[in-house]
Image: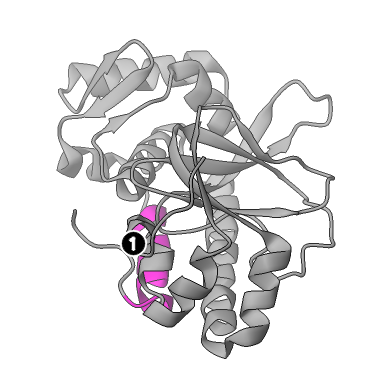
Amino acid sequence: MISPTTTEMLDNELLAKLNEDDRRRLAVHMMMFELAPQHILQPAGEEVVDTWFPCGSSLASFQLLSEDGSGAVEVALVGREGAIGGIVSNGSLPAYANAIVRIGGPFFRIKTAALEQAKLESITLRHWFARYSDCLIAQVFQTSACNATHTIMQRSAKWLLAAMARTRNPRVNTTQEQLAETLGVGRTFVTRIVHQLRNEGIIFTNRGAITVLNKSALKEKACRCTDLIENHYDIVLHGIYHDG
């Protein structure tokens, strides 16, 4: 682990939108880690002591365990556009959901107490993270509506598009079993969908990954939830999504 420079911090879009003074204010407390898939960033029920910023093509997600503990359902994705941890609270409250690494890579970490102190020193920093919190809540709302109203095909296509948007990479490192768990459905349903998308030339699969070959065709299969979420992020966070 190493401390990032303010230039390296530009690899996270949320940090890149800060002014230079606020980036410097955070940089002295930041450490950079290379994390593997399934690394737990934030265990449910434990105090939030760290705040994490995915960088590059890294991807994390918030997940809720089923009542019997046999599986987990994803409620939000977080990539280089966002953060995980004590964004608004003072970090003294327990986390409600697990946060885990979905696609490994670089992550910046700051102690939540240090982030809180920095926000006390800078009203622009405080307002910026409050805006991001609004966007994250919007994503959770939209995911809830999506799970209740859209087909498994629409949700599968939406998830792949969302992963691409956050990592800027057409190759999504996920297995069919992981995708089924993410959507909260049986693997046989996802297997049929993947088979259909592959036969139509929309995706290519190999061990542990799904590569999108035809993004436009995949968007035709998806619901509009990803577009709605990205539009809200762009309005509230001033164009945080852009072509890479």
The scheme the figure's colours follow is: one colour
Give yes or no for residue 233 being in the magenta stretch: yes
Q: Quadrant of residue 211?
A: top left
Give yes or no for residue 33 being in the magenta stretch: no
Pick whichever, 193 or 139, lies toward us.
139
Residue 228 visible, this angle: no
Q: How far from the left and from the top, in percent, is residue 9?
A: 39, 59
In the image, what residue occupies the spot 67% across and 31% down? 72
Q: How far from the left and from the top, in percent, is residue 197?
A: 26, 24
Q: How far from the left and from the top, in percent, is residue 171?
A: 27, 30
Q: Left of 140 or right of it: where is 150?
A: left
Q: Which residue position holds label 1? A: 10
Pick whichever, 192 or 31, lies toward us.
31
Q: Quadrant of residue 42?
A: top right
What's drawn in magenta, residue-wise? Answer: 225-238
Q: What amino acid is at disc 1?
A: Leu
In the image, what residue occupies the spot 59% across and 69% down? 133
Q: Is residue 49 above or below residue 67?
A: below
